[in-house]
Image (cartoon, rainbow, N blue to C red):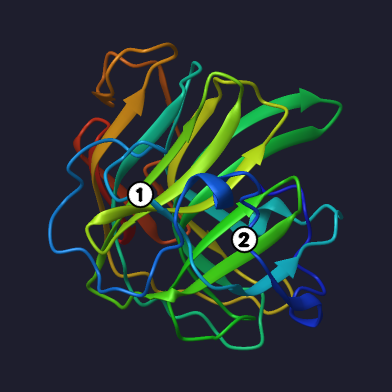
C-alpha cells in the first residue's frame, strides 16, 4: 500500500518527541537499557507478558509527514496482505544495509502494518519495524513506528540494530481497538507505542519489505536479501495465534518489480525479499 503522504519537507520537520503511550506509562515499568535478545519470544506480547515494559527514555527523533499525495511509482512493496481482518501479527525480520543515499527521501524498511480504508481516500494505520532512511541518520538502521494519528515516523535509538541482526515484532489490538506495537528486546516485550485508531479491534494486516526511491533523484537502490519468518496472525476474539499459511485469504503483489524479487519459502510465514 502506498503512503498517502508526501516525504517532502521531512528532514526540516525533525523534532524530539516522547513515546505516545498514555495509560501504558502507568501500567508498565519503564524499559531499562539492555542488550539485544538472545532467545526468541517465550509468549505473545501483551500488558501481562512477563517483564513487559514501555520503551524508556525519549523517542530521539520523529519526522512529521505533510499530507500531500506522492507519486506511487517511487514505492516498491514486497510481501503480502490479508484479505480479511485479524487482531494482530507477529514475526521476525532480518536487518540489512541498503544503498540508501543521504539527504534524500530514499528508504528501506521491513515492517508489519495494521490498517483500514476509511473511504474518501483516507486510510488509517499503525506500522512497526526497522528502517534505513536518507533523511534521519543516513546509513543507520533503526527501530521505528509510524501511525496516522500523528503522521510521524518515530525512531527508537535506545535499541541498537545493525545489519545481520534479527528483530521480533508484534502488532496487536485489545477488544476496544487500542493497537500496540511491541519489540522483543532484552528477552522481554518492550512497548513502543499504543494508538487508538479508527480501525476497530480487527484490521487488515500487511507484512512487507518496502523500498522508496526519491522521485526527484531516481536511482537503483540495492537491498540485500531480507529474511522474514515465524509470521503468525492473531484471530479476533480469544483464539491462539496461528501461522500465516495458504488457507488464510491473502493478497500478494508481483514477485519481481523494479529489480527486486520476492521468494516464498512457506506461504506466507517464511519468505525473502530484496535484490534478485
Judged from the image, the secondary structure of the residue bearing numbered disc 1 is loop
Instruction: Name the residue at 51% across, 25% down.
Output: 174
**Mark 1 closeness class: few <14, some 14–19, many ≥20 residues within 10 Å:** many
In percent of width and height, residue 39 lies at: 12, 56
In percent of width and height, residue 123 lies at: 73, 34
C-alpha separation, residue under disc 2 versus residue under disc 1: 16 Å
Instruction: Name the residue at 80% across, 34% down.
Output: 122
Position of the C terminus, as image quadrant, is bottom left
**Front residue of 253 and 131:** 131
* Callout count: 2
Sequence-earlier tag: 2 or 1: 2
- Place residue 247 in its image quadrant: top left
In percent of width and height, residue 54 lies at: 47, 56
Q: Is residue 152 above or below residue 12?
A: above
Is residue 241 shown left or right of residue 110? left
Q: Is residue 144 above or below residue 117?
A: below
Residue beneath label 1, please?
Answer: 52
Q: Is residue 86 above or below residue 28?
A: above
Closer mark to the observer between disc 2 and disc 1 = 1
Instruction: Name the residue at 24% across, 35% down.
Output: 269
Is residue 207 shown left or right of residue 49? right
Residue beneath label 2, please?
Answer: 19
Amino acid at each position: 500500500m502506498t503512503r498517502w503522504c508526501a516525504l517532502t519537507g521531512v528532514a526540516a520537520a525533525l523534532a524530539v518527541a516522547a513515546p505516545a503511550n498514555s495509560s501504558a506509562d502507568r501500567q508498565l515499568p519503564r524499559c531499562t537499557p539492555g542488550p539485544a535478545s538472545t532467545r526468541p519470544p517465550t509468549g505473545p506480547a501483551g500488558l501481562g507478558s512477563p517483564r513487559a515494559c514501555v520503551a524508556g527514555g525519549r523517542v530521539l527523533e520523529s519526522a512529521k509527514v505533510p499530507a500531500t499525495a506522492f507519486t506511487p511509482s517511487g514505492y516498491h512493496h514486497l510481501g503480502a496482505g490479508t484479505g480479511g481482518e485479524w487482531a494482530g501479527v507477529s514475526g521476525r525480520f532480518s536487518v540489512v544495509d541498503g544503498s540508501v543515499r543521504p539527504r534524500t527521501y530514499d528508504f528501506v524498511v521491513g515492517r508489519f502494518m495494521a490498517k483500514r480504508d476509511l473511504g474518501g481516500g483516507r486510510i488509517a494505520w499503525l506500522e512497526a519495524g526497522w528502517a534505513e532512511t536518507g533523511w534521519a541518520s543516513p546509513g543507520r538502521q533503526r527501530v521505528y513506528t509510524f501511525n496516522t494519528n500523528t503522521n510521524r515516523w518515530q525512531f527508537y535509538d535506545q535499541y541498537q540494530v545493525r545489519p545481520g541482526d534479527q528483530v521480533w515484532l508484534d502488532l496487536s489490538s485489545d477488544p476496544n481497538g487500542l493497537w500496540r506495537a511491541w519489540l522483543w528486546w532484552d528477552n522481554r516485550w518492550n512497548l513502543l507505542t499504543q494508538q487508538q485508531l479508527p480501525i476497530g479491534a480487527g484490521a487488515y494486516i500487511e507484512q512487507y519489505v518496502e523500498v522508496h526511491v526519491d522521485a526527484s533523484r531516481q536511482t537503483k537502490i540495492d537491498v540485500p536479501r531480507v529474511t522474514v519468518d515465524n509470521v503468525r496472525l492473531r484471530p479476533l476474539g480469544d483464539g491462539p495465534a496461528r501461522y500465516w499459511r495458504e488457507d488464510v485469504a491473502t493478497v500478494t503483489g508481483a514477485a519481481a518489480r523494479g529489480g527486486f524479487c520476492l521468494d516464498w519459502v512457506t506461504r506466507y510465514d517464511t519468505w525473502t525479499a530484496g535484490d534478485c
